[in-house]
Image: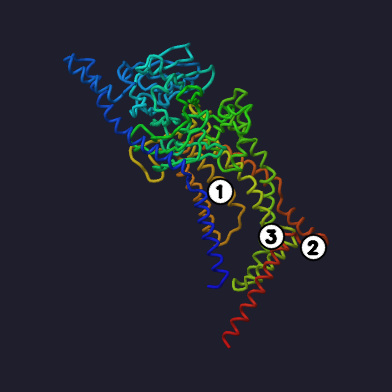
Amino acid sequence: MDKNTWIGFLLIAAIIVGFNIINRPSEEEIAERKRIQDSIAVAQKMEAEAQAISQQIAQQVDTVAPEETIDELNQRIEAVYGPFALSAKGEQQNIILENNKIRLHLSTLGGYVQRAELKEYKAYGDSVNALNLFRGDESQLSFTLITNNNRVISTKNLYFEPIINNPQNVTLRLKTNIEDAWLDFVYTLHEDDYMVGFEIKPQNMQYVLAQNVNMLDLQWNQLIPQQERGRTFEERYSQLQYMLVGGEMEKLSEQKHDQVQESARIKWIGYKDQYFSTVLIANSEFQSSTLESTPQDAFTKYIKEYKTTTSVAFDITGKQTTGFTYYFGPNHYNTLKSYDENLSSDEKLNLKELVPLGWKIVAWINKILVIPMFDIFSSWGLHIGIVILLMTLVIKLIILPFVFASFKSSAKMRVLKPQIDEINAKYPPEKMQERQQATMALYQKAGVSPMSGCLPMLFQLPVVMAMFWFLPTAIELRGKSLFWAEDLSTYDAVFTWDFNIPLLGDHLSLFCLLMTIVNIVYTYITMQTQGGGQEMKFMKWMMYLMPLMFLFVFNDYAAGLSYYYLVSLMFTILQTMIFRWSIDDKKILAQIEANAKKKGNQSKSGFMQRLEQMQREQQRLARENAKAQAKKMR
């Protein structure tokens, strides 16, 4: 290797080494990770013993044991729980906290939200009861407390005393053996809001907890029950997402088990289902987090299991409160966006990122066009089917100039086909360069660009993709019926069977079937304008095969999306008929011939000039290669 190569390798090695040095964790971060790992190990050991004692405590409720047995049990409780032994016994109660949107059940055992109901929504197949994001043992939030005599206590095993301040403010108090030392969990709910304030307020806990404690470790686990009819799509859109401090969204895999150890600071962690989410927001930040997502077996009633182990700043003196905010609610874009109103860029939560709106340009179109248009039509009190119909009409009008330009370009290419066939017959395949030159000369003379039909189609593609992303994630479609479809947010199965057909599944969706039939009709109409020839037969069969492929692809999709494509295709067929009526091939050919005679048309477009330049360069390289080969033969 020469000197430059060695220098290159050395520079690459220096960059890699420098990158690793810059990004390696600091001593404080290493110490923090070790502290968390040690705390988890000790907590797991203490947890096993605490569970055994809890079972014995439960047994004492129903049986009268000898006094010495009770004394021994109390001694063991004192040994395990230390200053929290007073709270190791109690009776589990549910405290209700509600407004007109949500109802929360707070458990006095553990002091966490045990059940969250959304009053305005129902689970699929249940028209009576409110939708439960979770209930019972499906969700659990626990904090690890380290006492001044090195006891490691988990709050989920302790009983809190409820103090109901008012119907929307509840304090759960964790008492200790010191009379004026306790830990308060304060929950605050506001009217017409999905947000719940959650504060941890210590009172004289410096006499109970270890003096070096300045972080509070928490463990948050939750099972996500299936809420929708279409499990496949619910699994696809259910995902653990979290927002880093600074506004960058991160996600765990929605398809397979995924675990991440995040050293960066986190603003909030979201346990997301297809249409609903539970989000825990830190008033300061989460640090040194481990996040895990596990898909559940298809035969269970659960979609995913999410787990988080993380830490937050904690002041045992109580001078600074450790605060959180819960969000229990729908993945509704405008609702989530409203929480950023009147906030600076640094304070914005960006919860709206929980709603998937597609790639960057597609998401941009959804935000500035599709969602506002949907909101306007919905505000008129129209049926959801009419709303989608009007949206389709508006989108068709927006992209109409592009579609017309593409259709007109196709018409120009069509009328030139006889002359193209003459060129192909004159120049055999082995004279491909001459054939291309003659074809380009004909296009330049006629004033036609081959790209003029493709570019308009590319311009309308992002708008079409925006609707593809928006409709399956629009919670407004959930539970809305149209004709035979009971719920436009899931598939409208009119035929079902007890076995699984590969690619198709166990049902057939009617809107998807109608869309496929109309798509085949549209393909037939389009093919009528194409020229014949043996070489085109295979291409025509492929064009007919694509609509059939869409039947298998969209059979599981939301009926609202298939309905949109059905209506869109019907508009497209009508549009095509109008274009054919308004565009005369003979007039186009006469116009092309008239333009060809004008002197102004002899000037070449930039595209044609570049294309011819590329052809000349190819010919030059071909000649040079031929000369080089001839020299080698000598």
Q: Give 503 or 110, whichever is nearer the viewer.
A: 110
Relative to 135, 455 lies left or right: right
Q: Residue, x 59% and y 24% (percent of image)?
A: 382
* Relative image position of residue 515 (x, y in whole percent): 52, 40
Disc 2, SS? helix
Circle 2 residues within 10 Å: few <14, some 14–19, many ≥20: some
Q: Which kind of residue does numbered mark 2 sit on?
A: Gln
Disc 3, SS? loop
Q: Which kind of residue does numbered mark 1 sit on?
A: Thr
Q: Which mark is residue 523?
A: 1
- First-in-chain label (3 vs 2): 3
Picture quarter containing residue 125? top left
Circle 1 residues within 10 Å: few <14, some 14–19, many ≥20: some
Work out whether residue 620 can be spotted: yes
* Relative image position of residue 456 (x, y in whole percent): 66, 49
Relative to 257, 475 lies left or right: right
- What residue would you read off at disc 3? 416
- What residue would you read off at disc 2? 602
Q: Which mark is residue 330?
A: none
Against 463, residue 453 (above or below) is below
Asked whether the beta carbons under mark 3 and mark 1 sit within 8 Å of each other, the answer is no
* Relative image position of residue 576 (x, y in whole percent): 64, 45
Q: CA distance from mark 2 to mark 1?
A: 37 Å
Q: Give 196 or 447, whichever is nearer the viewer.
A: 196
Q: CA distance from mark 3 to mark 2?
A: 18 Å
